[in-house]
Image (cartoon, rainbow, N blue to C red):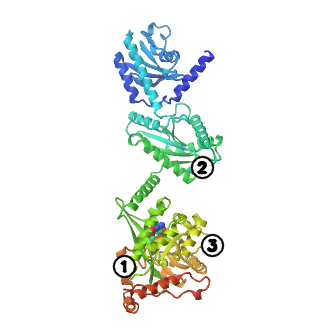
């Protein structure tokens, strides 16, 4: 063969391979044309036959058992070589084909029309075959050429419809979906497959790369990966470019799934060692076993994506899809979506209030507002589940705004009825970054004519430590405005003592995990005593959370803790129950004090007491103000 023939054949094969049609499942669009060809010629055999380097591969076939036959002495191979129509009325009479495998299998008649691409490459033939010699009418040849043209249109339409990624040259997600559907049509019930998704880099790495380099860098990363994946898989295995930096493939291997992980880990490690981007990108792989007949392509990709994220989060190179993890993420995602709707609708969200008690006097000195959500279909969902999701989203600001407005309205209503309490609200890390957060809080109080000290904001140490400098600035503005601040869940985060000392907080709330079971745990007791005295020495009042029994309360009283909150006193209460609880609490003293003070007098006395409560004097217990008057409710 001459050099130019070699290059022509190389170009022809390149054109064929770029179409990514070889070794794909049969498709109905092609089968329809093949059936039509067999019927029009009234012959038992017809095929769309593509000429690969060493074989004729049938994209679609009628009356043929095999998917491919050797290229040597195959008439379709001649059509591909010459790009011309070929008719052999009787193979036995043809000097070249008489001893071909086709003739040996009993085929006598052949007619094939070339499948020619728009840029002139012949991919193979649309052919019809018979077991008896036959003549061909000119109209039949015209029809065969028309059918070949229809096959080519179908091939080019498939290609043109955005099925190949221009950067990697690999079939894309659309093609993945279509091949998946074709595979399903061919599958038997319960047929198992495995999907493998390769993710080239974590979102953070991509963000860094895009920021530091020009867009070509990402293209190179992708092209580089496409070539090592293709080389790793070898010819005949199809890989799809399903997202910017993700490649998927389907395997029908019968290998037990547990053996997949170490195998892929080894392959990935070998591949990474050679790629240019090995220092800046961490590829991971997700594996999903699935039942071909009972799922769809996008669900498989979604599950593979979930496995990839598990791999990234766990620091492993390869992760197997986990149904439990997946369900959890799906629930989180839909909860976040639904929570956004809950904020906009009325009736799903409400606040409940848990009393806070001064240990020395036993008086209720405040209440913590806690958010409750009744989901329209899932029912009650606890803030322990939805708040961590909401706080990491853009809904954090709107949520705190809702809580602030609702709580201040409630505070106003209570004060108007003579119930005077300091109300504590939980705020999120994201709130501390809002430039106008302090202003909004102050305006909310002003609009309702509420004194600033009737509000306390609870912030966890972790929230403060997310952006310490900005948090400090916001907290200082709030403190200057006279709004009280509490460090919530103290002991569970990672704040340093330096921050604790600088925070303009009035109150430290010791997390309930330290208080639970304290009566039985001496080490815990030592820790809590140390927390109390350290916080008090720094000038903070100390509140113990999660006080559930008298023994815990007795310990806390002995350790000098200022206030307590917990089921021992009351669970978080609905608005109406809170009023009732409060009335019942101090019924006796209410009767004693009310005639003495009257509503206005009581309000003034209590406001004065609140304003005086903070700050605690650092390091000098003698100067700590006497416990607030036991009686806070006046009718
Ligand atoms: P937190 O601010 O530390 O609130 C105290 C939590 O402990 C509440 O849980 C309360 O019901 C519970 N608790 C109180 N006393 C006891 C007790 O004696 N034993 C036990 N086992 N638990 C007790 P809840 O209402 O489920 O809230 C959980 C967390 O959700 C809160 O912890 C807070 O971090 C967050 N959260 C609740 N409402 C809001 C809100 O409006 N905004 C923000 N940002 N976070 C909120
Ligand atoms: Mg709290
Ligand atoms: Mg807490």
Q: Which mark is residue 497?
A: 3
| Mark pair 2, 1: CA separation | 54 Å
Give percent across and percent down for residue 403. Answer: 43, 68
Q: Is residue 115 above or below residue 577?
A: above
Q: Is residue 412 above or below residue 91?
A: below
Q: Secondary structure at mark 3?
A: helix
Q: Nearer the viewer, residue 129 or 432?
A: 432
- Circle 1 sits on which residue? 579
Tag nearer the camera, 1 or 3: 1
Residue 320 shows in the view? no
Q: Quadrant of residue 582?
A: bottom left
Q: Secondary structure at mark 2?
A: helix
| Dots 1, 3 in contact, CB < 8 A | no
Q: Earlier in the sequence, mark 3 or mark 2?
A: 2
Q: Which mark is residue 205?
A: 2
| 10 Å crowding of disc 1: few (<14), some (14-19), many (20+) | some
| Dots 2, 1 in contact, CB < 8 A | no
| Mark pair 1, 3: CA separation | 39 Å
Image quadrant for the C terminus? bottom left
| Mark pair 3, 2: CA separation | 33 Å
């Amino acid at each position: 063969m001459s050099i130019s023939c070699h290059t022509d054949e190389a170009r022809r094969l390149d054109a064929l391979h770029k179409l990514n049609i070889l070794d794909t499942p049969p498709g109905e669009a092609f089968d329809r044309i093949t059936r039509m060809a067999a019927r029009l010629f009234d012959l038992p055999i017809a095929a769309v036959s593509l000429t690969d380097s060493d074989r004729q591969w049938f994209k679609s076939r009628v009356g043929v058992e095999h998917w491919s036959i050797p290229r040597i002495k195959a008439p379709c191979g001649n059509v591909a070589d010459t790009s011309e129509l070929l008719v052999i009325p009787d193979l036995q009479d043809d000097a070249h084909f008489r001893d071909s495998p086709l003739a040996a299998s009993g085929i006598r008649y052949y007619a094939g029309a070339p499948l020619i691409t728009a840029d002139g490459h012949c991919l193979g033939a649309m052919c019809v075959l018979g077991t008896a010699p036959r003549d061909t009418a000119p109209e039949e040849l015209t029809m065969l050429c028309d059918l070949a043209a229809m096959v080519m249109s179908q091939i080019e339409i498939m290609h043109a419809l955005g099925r190949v990624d221009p950067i990697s040259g690999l079939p894309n997600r659309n093609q993945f979906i279509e091949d998946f559907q074709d595979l399903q049509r061919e599958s038997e019930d319960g047929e198992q497959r495995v999907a493998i998704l390769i993710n080239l880099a974590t979102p953070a790495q991509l963000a860094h790369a895009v920021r530091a380099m020009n867009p070509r860098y990402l293209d190179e990363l992708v092209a580089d990966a496409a070539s090592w994946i293709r080389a790793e898989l070898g010819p005949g295995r199809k890989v799809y470019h399903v997202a910017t930096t993700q490649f998927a493939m389907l395997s029908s291997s019968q290998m037990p799934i547990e053996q997949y992980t170490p195998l892929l880990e080894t392959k990935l490690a070998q591949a990474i060692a050679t790629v240019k981007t090995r220092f800046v990108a961490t590829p991971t792989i997700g594996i999903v076993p699935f039942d071909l007949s009972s799922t769809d392509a996008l669900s498989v990709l979604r599950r593979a994506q979930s496995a990839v994220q598990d791999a990234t989060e766990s620091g492993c190179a390869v992760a197997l899809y986990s149904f439990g993890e997946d369900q959890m993420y799906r629930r989180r995602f839909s909860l976040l979506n639904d929570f956004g709707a809950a904020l906009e609708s009325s009736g799903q969200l409400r606040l409940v209030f848990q009393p806070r008690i001064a240990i020395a006097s036993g008086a209720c000195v405040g209440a913590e507002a806690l958010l409750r959500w009744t989901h329209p279909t899932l029912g009650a969902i606890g803030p322990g589940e939805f708040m961590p999701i909401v706080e990491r989203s853009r809904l954090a600001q709107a949520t705190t705004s809702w809580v602030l407005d609702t709580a201040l309205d409630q505070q106003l209503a209570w004060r108007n009825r003579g119930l005077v309490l300091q109300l504590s609200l939980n705020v999120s890390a994201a709130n501390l970054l809002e430039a106008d957060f302090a202003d909004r809080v102050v305006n909310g109080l002003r609009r309702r004519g509420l004194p600033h000290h009737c509000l306390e904001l609870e912030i966890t140490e972790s929230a403060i430590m997310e952006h310490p400098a900005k948090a400090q600035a916001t907290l200082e503005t709030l403190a200057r405005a006279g709004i009280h601040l509490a460090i919530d869940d103290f002991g569970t985060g990672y704040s340093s003592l330096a921050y604790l000392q600088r925070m303009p907080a009035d109150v430290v709330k010791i997390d309930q995990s330290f208080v639970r079971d304290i009566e039985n745990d001496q080490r815990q007791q030592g820790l809590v005593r140390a927390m109390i005295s350290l916080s008090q020495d720094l000038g903070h009042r100390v509140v113990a959370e999660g006080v559930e029994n008298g023994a815990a309360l007795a310990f806390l009283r002995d350790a000098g803790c200022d206030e307590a909150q917990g089921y021992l006193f009351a669970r978080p209460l609905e608005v109406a129950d809170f009023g009732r609880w409060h009335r019942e609490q101090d019924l006796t003293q209410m009767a004693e004090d009310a005639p003495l003070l009257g509503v206005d007098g009581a309000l003034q006395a209590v406001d004065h007491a609140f304003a005086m409560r903070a700050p605690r004097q650092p390091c000098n217990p003698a100067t700590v103000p006497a416990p607030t008057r036991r009686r806070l409710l006046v009718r």
